[in-house]
Image (spheres, rainbow, N blue to C red):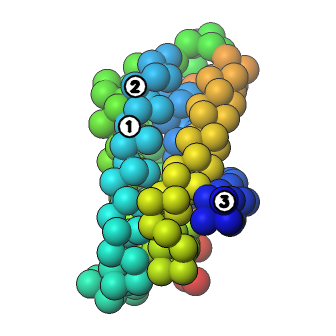
Amino acid sequence: MKSILVPFVTILLAEFADKTQLALLYLATRTKQRIQLMGGAVLGFSAVNGLTILFGHYLKNLVPASLIKVATGLFFILFGIFLLLSRNGHDDSKEVGQRDRLRHPFWSALSVIVLSELGDKTNLAAGLFAVRYQPALVFIGVMAALICLSGLTILVGDTLSHRIKPKLLSLLAAILFIILGLLTLWH
């Protein structure tokens, strides 16, 4: 039971309001297809954390942490800039509650999760737990925490999309992603 509970509580607390959950929150405001979005998130988390747990602490030696950190920081900065540039296509007259359709919510969530989780602190923690506890049980604990948080994040994103104008939401998300990218590069 400890092999499930320790990773569950640790990941749940560490991932709360993490950059990955913020990215998922933004995606949730852009689509009504919550099931597809959740499916992409679960597959992304499963792939990244499954591999990390499978390889345990050996994975951190495959790719230098500094390279992962730079790639993640640049990804978030570029994503923020993309959001700023794409805001020009938003119509200010759109009602709150109307959302631009995310073309492929499943693939969007999958790619964002994989890119932002690879080498993330919670991902590395999952690998370290696998060294100490039984890997299959660690995976269950980690995934249970991530599924709970992701489900909550998607519901909050859905609620926000009905209350905040898309152009303002896009601006806030762009600024947040750029700040997160800069903080990732700086730390």
- Residue 54 x %, y %: 34, 68
Distance from the alpha carbon under mark 3 to that under mark 2: 31 Å
- Residue 114 x %, y %: 36, 55
Whether residue 67 can be seen here: no
The quadrant of the image that shows the N terminus is bottom right
Distance from the alpha carbon under mark 3 to that under mark 1: 28 Å
Q: Amino acid at mark 1?
A: Gly
Which is closer to the viewer, label 3 or label 1? Answer: 3
Residue 132 left/right relative to 61: right
Residue 8 circle label: none
The quadrant of the image that shows the C terminus is bottom right
| Residue drawn at the location 69% of the way across and 31% of the way down | 156
**Direction left: furthest residue:** 62
- Residue 100 x %, y %: 45, 20
Q: Amino acid at mark 2?
A: Gln
What secondary structure is marked by label 3? loop
- Determine contact: label 1, label 2, CB under 8 Å: yes
Q: Amino acid at mark 3?
A: Met
> Which of disc 1 and disc 3 is earlier in sequence?
3
Front residue of 133/121: it is: 133
Q: State the count of labels.
A: 3
Q: Residues within 10 Å of mark 3 (few under 14, many from 20)?
A: few
Q: Residues within 10 Å of mark 1 (few under 14, many from 20)?
A: many
| Residue drawn at the location 36% of the way across and 43% of the way down | 43
Q: Residues within 10 Å of mark 2 (few under 14, many from 20)?
A: some
Rendered image quadrant of residue 42: top left
Distance from the alpha carbon under mark 1 to that under mark 2: 6 Å
Find disc 3 in the rendering and name its residue: 1
- Residue 109 x %, y %: 40, 40
Find disc 1 in the rendering and name its residue: 40
What secondary structure is marked by label 1? helix
Find disc 2 in the rendering and name its residue: 36
